[in-house]
């Protein structure tokens, strides 16, 4: 019996020890696993925070770039259309110069008239000098016709220069509408400047010269003017469409990609 009691006592003690060891091991591993997951969770949250901040920064940068692009694009379209209107308006009235009767005007009246119609002081003084030497009013008319043509050509150059400097902002539709206007302006200014000077100064129609290329260019003047008007209207419609809310939403999708 003593042996049996001793064995039972030993077994009981062993079970208790094993139970304690199992409990301690379970608690240790539980704490170890909890610590591990807490550390992993902290690392994950830290990495997620870094990714979120990076994405936020990237989004803000894209949004800032887009807003800058949109602002510059809107301003570019506004100036493009304004320059197109001015250029078309000036080309349409090119050649329709009506000069006063210089023979009946005093020198002071002629001076003030030139001052009002011309910009360059050097050109004004040169015109007055030549007129004073010969009293030939053709010098005055020539200077005025050249001055008016120069102003118109500068307006066209403003349109062309702005277009070429900002072409990267423009859509295919805007380019296909605006770019051909440059060539049409060039064709019209060449023939209309020639016509203006000959009609105003020498008082005859260059059609009467019988030169084939002049006749051909003059025959296209009205069609070219009408095409400029049509392209101006198309340009306006395209710009309004591209600056609408729908176009903004279409472009802004790029920010989120």
Image (cartoon, rainbow, N blue to C red):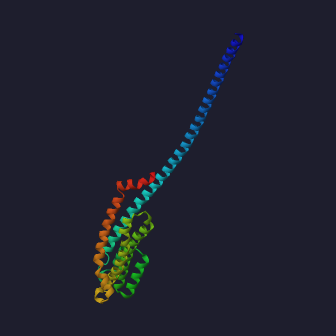
State which quadrant residue 115 falls in. bottom left
What x and y, as percent, mark residue 94? 32, 76
Residue 161 place in picture, x, y as percent: 43, 70
Residue at the farthest top position? 1
Q: Position of residue 194 (x, y in %)?
A: 34, 82
Q: Is residue 161 above or below residue 12?
A: below
Residue 87 horizontal side relative to residue 67, left or right = left
Mark count:
0
**Residue 29 relative to residue 115: left or right:** right
Q: Quadrant of the N terminus?
A: top right
Residue 98 visible in this rendered orientation of the protein: no
The residue furthest bottom is 210
Query: 12 left or right of 116?
Result: right
The spot of residue 151 in percent (x, y) is 38, 74
Q: Quadrant of residue 112?
A: bottom left
Image quadrant where residue 242 sits? bottom left
Along the viewing direction, whichever of 59 and 20 lies nearer the viewer: 20
**Residue at (35%, 78%) from the top-left corner?**
187
Residue depicted at x 67% and y 14%: 8
Q: Is residue 3 visible?
A: yes
């Amino acid at each position: 019996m003593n042996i049996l009691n001793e064995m039972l006592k030993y077994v009981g003690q062993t079970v208790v020890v094993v139970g304690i060891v199992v409990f301690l091991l379970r608690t240790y591993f539980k704490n170890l696993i909890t610590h591990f997951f807490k550390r992993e969770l902290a690392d994950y949250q830290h990495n997620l925070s870094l990714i979120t901040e990076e994405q936020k920064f990237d989004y803000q940068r894209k949004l800032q770039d887009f807003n800058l692009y949109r602002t510059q694009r809107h301003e570019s379209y506004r100036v493009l259309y304004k320059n197109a209107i001015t250029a078309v308006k000036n080309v349409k009235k090119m050649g329709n110069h009506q000069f006063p009767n210089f023979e009946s005007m005093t020198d002071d009246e002629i001076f003030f008239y030139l001052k009002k119609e011309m910009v360059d002081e050097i050109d004004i003084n040169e015109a007055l000098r030549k007129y004073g030497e010969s009293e030939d009013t053709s010098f005055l008319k020539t200077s005025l016709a050249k001055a008016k043509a120069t102003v118109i050509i500068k307006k066209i150059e403003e349109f062309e220069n702005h277009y070429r400097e900002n072409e990267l902002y423009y859509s295919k539709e805007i380019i296909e509408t605006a770019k051909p206007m440059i060539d049409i302006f060039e064709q019209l200014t060449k023939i209309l400047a020639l016509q203006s000077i000959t009609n105003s100064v020498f008082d005859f129609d260059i059609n009467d010269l019988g030169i084939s290329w002049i006749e051909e260019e003059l025959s296209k003047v009205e069609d070219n003017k009408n095409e400029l008007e049509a392209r101006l209207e198309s340009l306006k419609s395209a710009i309004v469409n591209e600056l609408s809310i729908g176009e903004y939403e279409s472009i802004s999708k790029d920010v989120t990609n």
